[in-house]
Image (cartoon, rainbow, N blue to C red):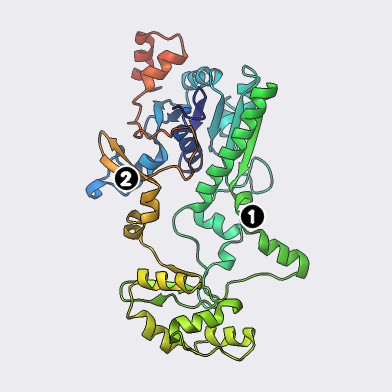
């Protein structure tokens, strides 16, 4: 079987997570992804974790995950020769996905306007913190600052404590997903109508779209949603569990904790829930939970029709019978990092295969790609390498 994106050539430029995650999805689905790196390598090559905590630009776990199924080409885009080679590669590509700072490509004559002069149906996706225009265009941002200015930090955490952000880098990964979706739509238009597109992806706008309910509350009632008074997850004998107790399951929850013969609470639902949330049943809940493992508590909650979740760590996720049954995780052997387990593709496509190949070594495919996409001889490629262009 083949991948759904077989035959497409994608050029990736930039650094970090968003563009790399977007093109990693394309590579898993069969696209030929050419990753353009500076001679010193993508910045994620310097970010851990590393095997045995020994920094190695070929073994960064983040880089290995983001850059599966790609070919690495080193190009110094600050040189005219590097810019010429970039344009030569793009001429024979279907799309470019980049997350350079606004203005970077214009200054090097590799902007969409410059590239599309020689490639009418080119699609170019540019991912930046705030977009290609507007008063914040040139501001710098990190995952944390974007999470704050995007409004999510205002609603995450306990109202009595400092605001929080989600773990990891979800804002940057979501920006990669948004870029993938928009780029695929633009390539469909290019294929059917021969019309190219410059896709302008803003990380901030992706965050703004992620909590629409808060916008509705503000529009309807001028109510600003803030963090609540959080109930601490409930300890078990080996971890934690959490329940989402709503009015229609409150008495089921009472029977779960107090036993099947527990009488229904005769208060109105709102008062009963408020009492439970204020700690009225804490002793009984702890007595029940501390005698059970988190998986036992989770199973019993589900059987009682009470929404429950145990707080899974990575060992739980790796051992998940659900994920194992769906063969979600894949093993990939890398020449420097060895065999590692990676998340697979989070969807099943009938009649199509996903491709899982190791991330490239720095510049591993430079000669191969330059020979494939240009008319340069081996000697000329060697001269460019000696000059530091490659």
Q: Secondary structure at mark 2?
A: strand
Q: Is residue 212 above or below residue 51?
A: below
The image quadrant of residue 115 is top right
Residue at 45% over, 8% down: 375
Q: Above or below — where is 42 with respect to 95?
A: below
Left or right: 220 as drawn, with respect to 86? right
From what the image shows, is residue 118 above or below residue 54? above
Residue 237 vs residue 95, the one in the foreground: 237
Do residues under tags 1 and 2 come within 8 Å of each other at their CB atoms? no
Residue 283 position, x and y percent, is 41, 89
Residue 108 visible in the picture: no
Looking at the image, which residue is at 50% across and 19% down?
89
**Image quadrant where residue 232 sits:** bottom left
Q: Against 310, is 60 above or below?
A: above
Q: Is residue 80 visible?
A: yes
Q: Where residue 13 appears, x then y in whole percent?
A: 49, 32
Q: Mark 1 or mark 2, which has the lower sequence index?
A: 1
Q: For numbered disc 1, what is the local secondary structure? A: helix
Q: Is residue 49 left or right of residue 300?
A: left
Label 1 or label 2, whichever lies nearer to me, is: 2
- Residue at horizontal 60 percent and vertical 91 percent from the top: 266
Label 2 packing within 10 angstroms: few (<14), some (14-19), many (20+) = few
| Residue 280's disc number | none
**Quadrant of the rendering where the C terminus is positioned:** top left
Q: Between residues 301 and 163, which one lies in front from this camera angle?
A: 301
Q: Which residue was labeled with disc 2? A: 341
Give the labeled residue for mark 1: 208
Crowd rating for badge 1 (residues with CA inside 10 Å; few <14, some 14–19, many 20+):
some
Residue 156 in the image, given as x and y percentages of width and height: 54, 67
The residue at the point 50 percent across, 62 percent down is 165
Q: Residue furthest left?
A: 52
């Amino acid at each position: 079987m083949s991948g759904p994106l077989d035959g497409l050539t994608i050029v990736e430029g930039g650094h970090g997570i968003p563009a790399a995650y977007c093109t990693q999805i394309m590579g898993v689905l069969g696209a030929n992804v050419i990753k353009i790196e500076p001679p010193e390598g993508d910045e994620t090559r310097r970010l851990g974790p590393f095997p045995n905590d020994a920094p190695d630009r070929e073994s960064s776990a983040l880089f290995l995950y983001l850059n599966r199924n790609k070919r690495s080409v080193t190009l110094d885009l600050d040189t005219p020769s590097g810019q010429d080679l970039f344009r030569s590669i793009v001429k024979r590509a279907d799309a470019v996905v980049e997350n350079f700072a606004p203005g970077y490509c214009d200054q090097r004559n590799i902007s969409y306007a410059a590239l599309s002069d020689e490639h009418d149906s080119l699609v170019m996706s540019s991912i930046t913190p705030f977009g290609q225009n507007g008063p914040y265009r040139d501001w710098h941002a990190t995952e944390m600052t974007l999470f704050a200015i995007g409004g999510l930090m205002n609603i995450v955490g306990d109202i009595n404590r400092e605001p929080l952000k989600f773990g990891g880098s979800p804002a940057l990964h979501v920006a990669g997903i948004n870029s993938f979706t928009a780029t695929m739509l633009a390539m469909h238009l290019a294929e059917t109508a021969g019309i190219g597109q410059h896709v302008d992806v803003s990380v901030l706008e992706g965050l703004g779209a992620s909590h629409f309910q808060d916008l509705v509350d503000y529009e309807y009632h001028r109510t600003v949603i803030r963090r609540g008074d959080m109930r601490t997850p409930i300890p078990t004998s080996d971890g934690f569990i959490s329940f989402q107790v709503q009015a229609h399951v409150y008495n089921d929850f009472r029977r779960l904790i107090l036993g099947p013969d527990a009488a229904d609470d005769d208060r109105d639902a709102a008062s009963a829930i408020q009492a439970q949330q204020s700690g009225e049943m804490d002793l009984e809940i702890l007595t029940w939970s501390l005698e059970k493992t988190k998986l036992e508590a989770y199973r019993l909650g589900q059987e009682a029709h009470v929404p429950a979740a145990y707080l899974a760590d990575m060992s739980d996720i790796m051992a998940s019978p659900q994920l194992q049954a769906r063969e979600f995780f894949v093993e990939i052997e890398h020449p420097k990092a060895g065999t590692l387990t990676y998340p697979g593709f989070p969807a099943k496509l009938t009649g199509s295969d996903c491709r899982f190949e190791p991330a490239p070594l720095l510049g591993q495919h430079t000669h191969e790609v330059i020979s494939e996409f240009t008319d340069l001889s081996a000697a000329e490629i060697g001269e460019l390498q000696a000059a530091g262009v490659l």
